[in-house]
Amino acid sequence: MTAPMPRDIASQFASARLRLTLPLLLIALPALAQKDDAPIPYDDEGATEEPVKPKKSRKSERLREEDEDAAERDERLASTDDPNYGVGAELNAGLMLLDASRGGVDPRFSFGVRFTWEFGRLFSDEYLREMFFADVQWRFAVTTDGTAQISSWGSQHDFSLAPAIVWAFSKTLGAYAQLGLGVNAAFTGVRIDTTEVQLQGARFLFQYGIGLRGRPAVTEDETIRITWRVEITRYLRGYMHDTYFGAGIGLLF
């Protein structure tokens, strides 16, 4: 009998090894598959923790909070760092067209004084702070008529409180419209030779008008401003309707 060659022995050994390996692999595959498909364990301790936000979400939230803080800071600065209190006084003068009882108008020189309060500064919003003011004013005009023997005179005193709304062109210039209420005090007299009879009375006054108002700064820190204005104002006193064309100048602190 012929002995097997070494090559044949090696082939037989490899074939036997392959036959042994295949059954082992078939047995191990289900175990490996079961291990890979096992569910991921749930961490009970981490269940109470808040989910981690993406970096982009955290950045957006931080920017939003910074914007809100900046807006609140601007409002605080607008209400606390304003160099003016918004209180001032003006002298004013102009032409008053008094409604004459005999018909037409009686043009007379008129002058007065007014105190101004920019009550818009009660608001924290910068735009609203510059939008409102109010005047407390007194205006005076005198009429005379007659001859050396018989003459009459009258004086009109208009007292009013008039808030206004401003349409600003800049921080120092704006147009305004105004409405007000007050009292007209009239003093009249009739003189015949050396005898004089005087009368006096008061009636409700309604005021409305428009104007242009400027507030240029005098000092570098703007704590003092010059205020000026030109205006057209009408006064309704009873059935009489007076029209005033004038200008004023003063200081604002």
Image: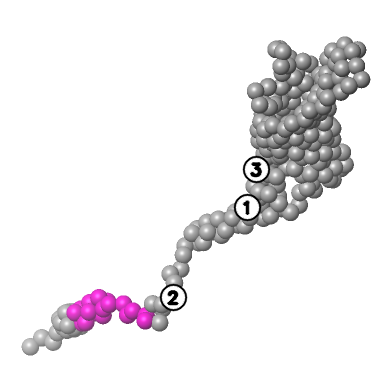
Asked if labels 2 and 1 touch by Cβ distance under 8 angstroms, the answer is no
Residue type at mark 3 is Leu
Write down the residue under mark 2. 49
- Pinpoint residue 160: horizontal percent, then vertical percent: 72, 35
Q: Does the magenta stretch include residue 39?
A: yes
Relative vertical location of residue 11 with respect to residue 224 in this rendering, above or below: below
Image coordinates of residue 39 in percent, x first then y, are: 27, 77
Closer to the camera in the image, 209 or 123: 209
Please name the residue shown 86% across and 19% down the image.
191
Q: Mark 2 or mark 3: which comes first in sequence?
A: 2
The amino acid sitting under disc 2 is Glu
Residue 6 pos. (x, y %): 20, 83
Stretch of the chain drawn in magenta: 28-44
Among the 4 quarters of the image, the one containing residue 216: top right
Residue 220, picture quadrant: top right
User: Circle 3: is it few (<14), some (14-19), or many (20+) Cα within 10 Å?
Assistant: some
What residue does disc 3 label? 128
Q: Tell me if residue 5 comes above or below residue 104 in the rendering.
A: below
Q: In the rendered view, would you say 52 is above or below 113?
A: below
Left or right, residue 249 beside residue 105: right
- Of the numbered discs 1 and 2, the one sitting upstream in the chain is 2
The answer to whether 46 appears left or right of 6 in the picture is right
42 falls in the magenta region: yes
Q: Which mark is residue 71?
A: 1
Q: Residue at x 19, y 79 (%)?
A: 30
Q: What element carries label 3?
A: helix
Kind of residue indicated by mark 1: Ala
Picture residue at 47% right of the left edge, 62% below the top = 54
Question: Secondary structure under badge 1?
Answer: helix
- Decide which of 24, 159 is in the foreground and name it: 159
